[in-house]
Image: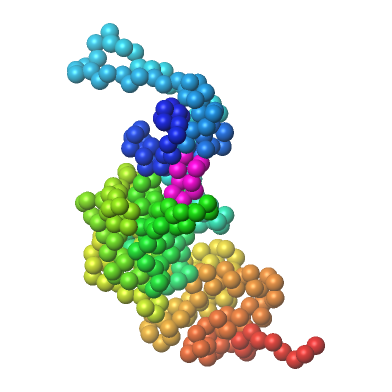
Amino acid sequence: MARLLADDSNRNFTVGEVVRALGNSGGAIGNALEKLVSRGEAVRAVTNPRTYRANGATVAAAQAASVTPPTRRQSGPSSGTGPRPATPPAADATQPSPPASEPAPTTGAKSGRPLPITRPNGMTYHPRELAQMPDVEALRNLRNAGVPVLLYGPPGTGKTSVIEAAFPDLITLAGDGDTEVADLIGEYTQCEGGGYEFVYGPLVTAMQEGRPLLVDDATLISPKVLAALYPAMDGRRQIQVKAHKGEKITAAEGFYVIAGHNPGVHGAVLTEALASRFSVQIQVGSDYDLAEALKIRPKAVTIARNLARLQDKGEVGWAPQLRELLAFQKVEAVLGTEAAFANLIGIAPLEDRDVVAELVRKVTGHRARPLSLGHQL
């Protein structure tokens, strides 16, 4: 890799260009390039999209690298007289670190139970069961098979969490009604020194680097905008960037699309065109057993379970999800239990607050009202 940069030292290389030149996965190439930068043996010229070029130390790094020529494949069984396979180099500090896309084991060696996974934000994700295996493992298998997935369910149930846990090399696009094609593919941006340069969007970056792309709240994005995504998902795995001289982008190995959908959110529309692109659609609800395991106050979990049952019957439109229960736990630690229950009522939609307040009274034995300021002290 250092030799590739050094041979054309005046050129900026994108990760995708290095992938096409060397043939490795986008995750491995990206990590190795960052390793060169961290050692001072290359320069990251541009951050978005990531591009790299040689510096004075790159030539020395290329000369120091030991490259073993590939062994010629034999046409028949080995006779024992052919060239001996090269001995793998011993692992040392000069070897690239494992690619970020290579996930850690999902189960404990002794118990066989799924291990918690640390997400990029530092929070821990506890895997759940999906098709008789840990959900993160199932999602990784679907990525390897090239089967796009749509996760759907209320906000706060863990859709984004499981995706981040499954794919450490994830790129995310947060969709809404204002999302434009440029937000997906890229656009010209003014440079600091004047002039303009084309900055690729998350779709192109994911395609070039062979990374998964999460289109969060995909059903809030205009169908006309989403149409720009579809050619990358079908057999072509290619898009044309009309705004950038009609450039054609072909997806590198590892590119994958996964989407999130909140059916109850105003404006969310799952069109037939979008649904047909996702062969697997998985419902995600809150894991109230996990809430109990996380030591959230049992009475709060009981209220959430009861509201979820009423929601299933269509008697209320809202029930606390795991996100709200974790917030309850934090509020309780800071302001106390009474205030936490009062806040639980206050965050409910106005039309459901009376039902929530009545459930709080029945479960706790105390009347509560939405958290509010009192008399002047």
Q: Residue furthest front?
A: 194
Residue appearing at x 39%, y 68% in the figure: 179
Q: Residue furthest left?
A: 76
Based on the picture, tell me whether residue 286 belongs to the magenta stretch: no
- Image quadrant in which you'd find residue 278: bottom left
In the displayed structure, would residue 74 be above or below residue 278? above
Q: Is residue 280 visible?
A: no
Q: Is residue 268 visible?
A: yes
Along the line of sight, the residue nearer the viewer: 17 or 233: 17
Residue appearing at x 23%, y 67% in the figure: 273
Q: Position of residue 277 (x, y in %)?
A: 25, 61
In the picture, measured across the screen, residue 27 lies left or right of residue 291, that is left
- Image quadrant in which you'd find residue 260: bottom left
Q: Residue furthest right?
A: 377
Which residues are drawn in magenta?
44-52
Q: Which quadrant holds the C terminus?
A: bottom right
Q: Position of residue 315 (x, y in %)?
A: 41, 87
Q: Position of residue 185 (x, y in %)?
A: 36, 57
Q: Which quadrant holds the N terminus?
A: top left
